[in-house]
Image (tube, coloured by chain):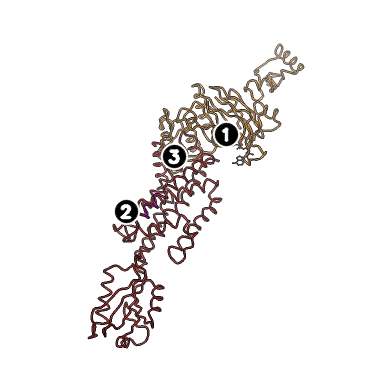
Chain colours: A orange, B red
Amino acid sequence: MISVKNLYHSYTHDDVYAVNNVSFEIAKGEVFGFLGPSGAGKSTTQGVLTGLLPLQKGEVTVAGYDMRRRNRQMFNKIGVSFEQSNVYNKLTALENLEFYKKLFDVKTEDPMKLLEIAGLSEVAKHKAGTFSKGMKHRLTFVRSMLNNPELWFLDEPTTGLDPAIGRQIIDIVKQKKSEGTTVFLTTHNMNVADELCDRIAFIIDGEIKLIDSPRNLKLQFGEKLVVVDHIVNGITKREQFSLIDPADMARLNTLISTGQIEMMHTKEATLEEIFIKVTGRGLE
Amino acid sequence: MKKLWTTFIKDVKLSYSGLYFYIEIGMAAIFLAVMLFVVPENFDKTQTYYAFIEVDEIRDEFDGRVFENDGTRVELFDDREGLEQALSKKRSAVGLHVYMEDSKPVVEFVLQGYEGPEMKQMLKQTVEGGLLAELPTYEDLTTVTVLEPGTERLSDRVSMLPPYLVINVAFMGLFVIAAYVFLDKEEGVIKAFAVTPVKVWHYLASKIMIMAVMGLVTSTLVVVSLVGFKINYLLFFGLILSFNVFGSTLGLLITSFFDSMTKAMGALFLSIFILVFAGFSYFMPSFSPVWIKFLPSYPMFFSFRELFLENGDTGFIIQNILLFLGLSAVLFAYTNLRFKKTLTV
Ligand SMILES: Nc1ncnc2c1ncn2[C@@H]1O[C@H](COP(=O)(O)OP(=O)(O)OP(=O)(O)O)[C@@H](O)[C@H]1O
Ligand SMILES: [Mg+2]
C-alpha cells in the first residue's frame, strides 16, 4: 500500500533534514505505527506521503500512485486526520462534513452517522467554532472517514484527548482494521501503538532506528520478568525474577515447588522502556 | 464543475459570515453617502464667466474687473489670449467675447467642448436676457467657438465613479483574496481541502468567483444609485467582471509567493501603490507620461470613464474587457501552476 525508499525532506532546502533517509513498506491491511518524540519527523513524513509537502528526494508510492507524478484521484482512496484540527469554524459540524462529502467521486458515509460515532450528533447544527478542542478533534477525525478510505493516515489521533474519548477513537480504528483498512498511525503514545499496530517504526531525529512488530520488539529487547506474590510468615510478598538470569531462574523454581504462591504473572517490558533502551531517549 | 460549485457555495457561506463582505458593503455605502450628500453634482456651484468685452457701452456697465452676484461671477480680460488661457485652467468656466461687427454688438461664446446643446441654449438665453437685452442696438449674431472640439466632460460626481470602481473591484480584490487564502492557511482547512480529489484550480476559481460576486453587487449598488439606468449595463458588468477577475488573479499570484499575510503585505501594498499612479493621470490629464499608460490600471480608469460618457467609445470598452479577460487567463494558468506546488507548504 505504501512504499518509501530513501526519503529525505528539508524545510530549509539544505542538508538539515527533518526526514533523513527513511525507507519502509506498508502492506495492505496493515496498521503501521510511526513512533517517536516531538520533532522526530513523523508529521513531516505523513506530509510527504499525503502530498501536502513536496517530494524532494526519494521514491514514494502511495496506494499505487507515484508521488512524483501526483494524481488527485488518489484522494478518493485516502483519508487523512490531522494532528491539529482544521475545520471551518464558521460552518456547522454537519455543514463541514456535507461540504467534504461532495468533493469525493466515490461512495461516501452518511455525515449524521459519522457525527454519531464522534458523539457530536447533538451539536450537528452548531458552528464548529463554538466547539471545544476535543470536539473539533473528533470532527476532524470522523471527517477522514467520509470516503471509507482504503488507506487511512492518522496523525496523533488520541493526543490531547481525555482518556474516554481516546478509548473510543482506538476502538473505531480497531473496527476499521478488522474491515481491512490500511492505517499509517503517527503517535508518541506507546500504549496506543502497542494496542493497534502490527508493526512499529521507531523514528528519532528524522531517522528510523528500527521497525518490527510490538511482540518481536518485546521478545528481543524486553527483559522477560515473572512477578510472584507469595506468602512468607503470613505476609504477602512480591518479588520479580528475570527469566534470563540463571540464579533468578533457580530461585523461581524452588519457590514454585515449595512456596505458597498467591499469584504469578509474566511482566513484559513496555514499548516505552524498549524505546528508551533502543534510542537512548524518552518519548516526551 | 459540480465540485467547483460546491466549493463556491461553501465560500459564499463563509464570506457572508466573515468580515470582508461587510467591509466592501460598508465602503460602498459610505462612498454612496458621501457622493449623494456631500459632493454636489458639480463641486463648483457658481457659474464663472470670463469675458473680453470690446464694446465700450457694455464694458462700462461693469465697474471693476470682477462682478459677482448670486450664482454668477464675471471676470473681465483685456485680450482674447488671456481669456482662453484662463478658460483652459478653469474647466467649468464659460468664456464670452463681445465685439462690434457692422456697428452691432456680437457675443461669441468660448466653450470648453463638453457642454451639451441644452447647456449652450441656456447660456445663450441667460446672456441675451440678462446682459444684453436692454441694449437697443442688439441683434442676435451670437456665435459659438469651442476650445477642444469633441471632448465631453463627466459631472463632478460621476467623475468620482471610475476611481471608486477601480479601487473596489481591482485593488480591494487584490487584497481581500489574499486575506481569504491566508485565512484558510492559518485555520489549516486548506490542508484538509488538499487531501480531497479536488483540483487546485477549483479552489482558486471559487475564490475569484466570490470576489466577482462581491464586486458586482457593491458596484452595481453604487452605480445604479448615482447614475440610474443611463449607461449600458451589459458593458458595465463586462468591465467589472474582467477587472475583478484580473485583480483577484493578480492577488492570488502575489499570494503564492508568501506563506503569511504579514509577509505578503509589503508586496500587496507595493502593487496597489504602483497601480494607483494611473489615478493621477485620470485626475490631471496633463500628467500622462508614457510609462503610466502601461499600468493595467490606466485602461481601467479610462474604460470606466468612457462608459459614463454620453457618447463613450464602446469599442475601447469592449477591447479592454477582452484584453483583461485574456490577461487574466494567462495569469491564472501560471498562478495555478504555482499553487499546485505551494498551496499547503
Ligand atoms: N513548517 C516547518 N518549517 C520548518 N521546520 C519545520 C516545519 N515543520 C516542522 N519542522 C521541523 O521539522 C522537524 C520535524 O517536525 P515534525 O513536525 O515532522 O515532527 P513530529 O515528529 O511530527 O513531532 P510532534 O510529535 O511534535 O508532532 C522538527 O525539527 C521541526 O522543528
Ligand atoms: Mg507531528
Quadrant position of ligand 2: top right
Please state which of residues A230 and A193 is positioned toward the viewer in this rendering. A193
| Part of the protein shown in magenta | B314-322
**A97, above or below A266, in the image:** below
Please state which of residues B134 and A181 is positioned toward the viewer in this rendering. B134
Most common SS among magenta residues: helix
**Residue at numbered disc 2:** B233
Query: Mark 2 Cα within 10 Å, few/some/many (few <14, many 20+)?
Result: some
Q: Position of residue A65 (x, y in %)?
A: 53, 28
Query: Quick check: do tags 3 and 1 share a chain?
Result: no
Q: Position of residue A100 (x, y in %)?
A: 44, 35
Residue B159 position by quadrant: bottom left
Q: Residue at x 56, y 32 (%)?
A: A68
Please state which of residues B34 and B76 is positioned toward the viewer in this rendering. B76
**Residue at numbered disc 1:** A48
Residue A51 is inside the magenta segment: no
Amino acid carrying mark 3 in the image: His
Please state which of residues B85 and A107 is positioned toward the viewer in this rendering. B85
**Residue at numbered disc 3:** B202
* Alpha-carbon span between mark 3 and mark 1: 22 Å
Amino acid carrying mark 1 in the image: Val
